[in-house]
Every structure is written in structure tokens, then in C-alpha cells.
Amino acid sequence: MNLSPVIIAIPIYFLLMGIELIVLRFQKNPSYRMNDAITNINLGVVSQVSGVFIKVLSIGVYTFLYEQFAFFEIQNNIWTFFILFFLYDFCYYWAHRKSHEINLFWGGHVVHHSSEEYNLSVALRQSSTQTIWTFFFYLPLAFLGFDPVFLVLVSGLNLLYQFWIHTEAIGKMGFLEKFMNTPSHHRVHHGRNPKYIDKNHGGTFIIFDRWFGTFQEEEEKPTYGITVPVNSWNPVWVNLSHYVSMKEEMKQIPNWSDKIRYMFNKPGWLPDYLGGYRGVKEVDENYRKFDTTVPKALNYYVFFQYVVLMGITAYFLFNLENFDWPLKVGLSFLIVWSTVSFSGIFEQSRMYHVQEIARVALFLIAAWYIGLDFLPQNIIIIVLSMYGFSSYFWLWKNENVVKKFQKSITNEQQHA
């Protein structure tokens, strides 16, 4: 069983998001949108699934250096745990800061900042590539002699701490603001206002920002998101969009030395002969958040399918050691495909209907294969028959609803 603190805490995440929704409703704060929240969770799902493969690299390198080159033999106890927790957060600060200050690394971190809302679901909006650019910031801990198992535990707890600070439901927290990262400090970090850009990089503690000159107090309410919005609900595209933009801009740069400088300078940098550094501008007063509208029936359909997908994903993550690599790859593909298919529904992709028909069929096959391990065959047949019938009936029914909806939108636009 997967005992990662992040995986074990999944039910708590959803419980806290439910509580936050209630609190925000009382506060009359409309910071949750279904398409945005599901995209946030989709990106968390894709990150966890891709992490099954990428973390083999990062943990493998750390373990190798620990076993071969550790200077000290540090025992695992409560005192070394606290020391490691503090040192890990120090390493996290620099990994996080450089993820904002180096264009290539920003490609791995921009995903987390791309939501234009700020709520607990945004904490789950994680990148699938960030580990590639940041894992080496923690390697000094291997040379010091900190056990890899302890490191995984501490990294999970550090990430868990950062979950609850992604909320507008909690104001400033008095003396804790002096040394701990809080919702107020982290709201600043997610702001795209020029004064808030690249501030408050700490994970658990805010003291490193105060020491190294990157601290900013929350003043006016931040405008959340990134300076060039990604404008998509597709989790795969959200992960790749910055790299694609980099590729297009690098085509304009004629020499390799400037191409390398482009990759490792701050986001927005270009050579002087192409206009130079593009600074962050004030948020346009006419700025509107990216949004799309679909019939309510389709929102209900996505929610129903999403609950089913979360069940399969949780089973996959909790039982990784029971799957061989071909099955891991196959289930990972199905889960990622599902998240992309849901984004196609939100964006009214031309192929969403056909794609969903094929996805549900593949989902039935995977669920049958998995279900045989712990349910009687006749029960599996009944459950999957009900799921398949309800899904295809809903798609058939919604096809006409969507056509009418799209026609009404077209008529409104023509009338306008």
C-alpha cells in the first residue's frame, strides 16, 4: 500500500474543500467555479500519475548519493526529523525561488500559478514536470546523510502544510505571520500584480523570504493567475504550454549563446535586438477571467464521471506495488485521457462526444479487469452494466441538448 502522506490525505483534501465551500458561501465569496476546480484536481491527478514514473529518477538519484557518498550517518529520531524538516524547507525555498527566476524551470512551476481563482483546489494544481528541474536542490541533504525514507516523509508533510494556505476564507493570523507561511502570505505569492510577482517563496516558513529579500506583505487584494493566461482546461496543454511558447520564441533568436541565456534568464527575457526584457505590467482594468459555459446537464455528467474516475485513481495510487509496469502504464494513460476528455467537454471540443464514447468503453474494460480482484463476477457485471448504460444514455440525451445550446449561443452572438 502507498503510505505517502500526500496520498493518505486525499480524503481529507476533499473534506476540507467541502468545508471551505460552505464558509465561502457564507462570506459571499464566489471563488469556486466547477470547470476551474475540476481542472485543478485534474492537474493534481496527472501530476500524481506521472510522478509514479518521474519520482523513480529523483528518489533513485538521492538514494544512490546517500548510500555511496553520505558524509555522516544521521540516525532517524524526533530531533533529526525537526532538523531535516527545517533544512528541507530551506532547500524548498531556493528550488521554488529559482522556479520563478529561471525561464526553463518556470515551465515546470507555471502550472501551479495558472488558475485565476484562489481556493483549496488550487493547492492540488501541480505540475508533472517540476520535479525534473528541482530535485537536485535537495541532493545536499543526501550528502549530509539524511535517510531517503525520512526525506520522502518530510517532503510529503511539507506539501501537506501548504494545502491549507490556499484559501481566501482565512484572514491574517497575528504573530504567526512573522515566521510561518500563512494564507495571507501565500495569496501574495499567487498574485500577478507587479508588486506581488516573485514574492513569498517559502513552503512552511516565511523567515527565508524575510532573510533573503523576497518578502511582501499582503496589501490590496491580489489578482490571481499568470501574466499570459493559458486559457484552457486541458491538463496536458496546461503542462506543456509554456514549453511550446519557449520553443516559438527561441526560433526568433539566431545564435545559441542567446538561446541558452533565454532558457536560464528570467521569464520575459529576450535579447536587446528583439526588444529586451518584457516587464510585468499592471493588470488591465478590462481583464476578464477565462471561462466557458456548457449546459447544466453536461456539468452533471462530468461530475458523475469524475467521482468514478477519482475512485479508480485512488485505487491505482494506493495499490501501485500490486501492478506490473504494463498495467501501470495502461491505467496511467486511461486516467490522463479521462482528464483530457473532461476538458474537451468544458471547451466543447468537436470530438468530445466520440472521444467520450471510446473512453467509457475502455474504462469499462479496465474496471472489469481491476474488479475481478475483489468483487464477485456477477456483481461486477451488474455494476458495470449500470455504469455503461447510464453513461451512454446520458451522452445520447445530451447530444441533442448540446446542439440546441450551441445554436442558441450562435443566435445570441448574431443578434448582438
Image (cartoon, rainbow, N blue to C red):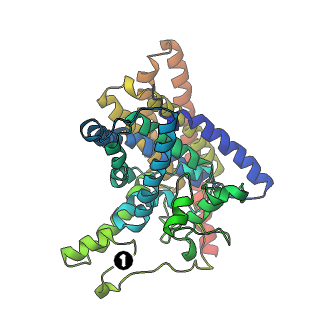
Dividing the image into 4 quarters, which one contains the C terminus? bottom right
Q: Quadrant of residue 262?
A: bottom left
Read off the residue under disc 1. 269
Q: Which residue is drawn at 54% across and 19% down?
A: 382
Q: In this view, does 357 lie above or below 251?
A: above
Q: Which amino acid does label 1 sit on?
A: Trp
- Using the image as rendered, state which of residue 136 and residue 306 is in the foreground: 136
Q: Residue at x 49, y 67 (%)?
A: 212
Residue 263, horizontal then vertical, whole percent: 30, 68
Residue 367, horizontal then vertical, whole percent: 45, 26
Q: In this view, does 334 lie above or below 137?
A: above
- Using the image as rendered, state which of residue 387 and residue 70 is in the foreground: 70
SS at badge 1: loop
- Residue placed farthest to the right in the image? 26
Dividing the image into 4 quarters, which one contains the N terminus? top left
Position of 68 with respect to 267 (left or right) is left
Q: Which residue is drawn at 39% across and 71% down?
A: 267
